Image (tube, grey):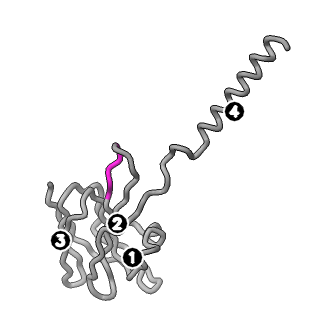
Amino acid sequence: MRKSTVISAAIIAGLIVFAALYFSPVGKPTAPNVTIAAVQPIGNDLYLYVTQINNGGATVPMTYRYYIGEEIDPRSIDIQLSHEEPFIVSNSDRFTWGYAMGEVTINVTGRLYDFKSSASYLKKGIRNQMPVRVLNTPQ
């Protein structure tokens, strides 16, 4: 066999190994691990859900996402809430809340990464909005 043929075969084999390792799922992050951190009934058949998202790793912090919605089966909460947008994203599940005159007030202890002044939710198949007052107590 000629020297150039051996070199070409080695390069092709190396490219195949590189591509197989690059595109294989081994060592790559999987879907986020979603667990329920808190569930609080807030009235009108609505609940406040706080989920913990653990994407894993020492450099990726856990985040907590706050939602409002109807009662959800805990076994499928990650699937059902994946279609919803959280109104608070924080590094903490420590909070106090109140509900008065159609508005939810939430005080989160910790860092807020994102928050909205209203929560969108489905109730009996109809999209609704609820005003939310977000307060923050830094850690």
The residue positioned farthest toward the bottom in the image shown: 44
Which of pointers 2 and 1 indicates the residue nearer the eye?
2
In front: 75, or 120?
Answer: 75
Query: Which residue carries the number 3 mark?
Result: 96
Magenta stretch secondary structure, dominant: loop
Mark 1 crowdedness (10 Å alpha carbons): few <14, some 14-19, many ≥20 = many
Q: Please say if the residues under marks 4 and 3 sit with CB atoms less than 8 Å apart.
A: no
The answer to if 62 sits in the magenta stretch is yes
Circle 4 — which element?
Answer: helix
Is residue 3 positioned above or below 136 on the image? above
Residue type, mark 1 in image: Tyr
Q: Give the Cα separation between the discs numbered 2 and 4.
A: 41 Å
Image quadrant in which you'd find residue 2: top right
Q: Quadrant of the C terminus?
A: bottom left
- Mark 1 lies on a secondary structure that is strand
User: Which dot, 4 or 1, sits closer to the camera?
Assistant: 4
Question: Residue beneath label 4, please?
Answer: 16
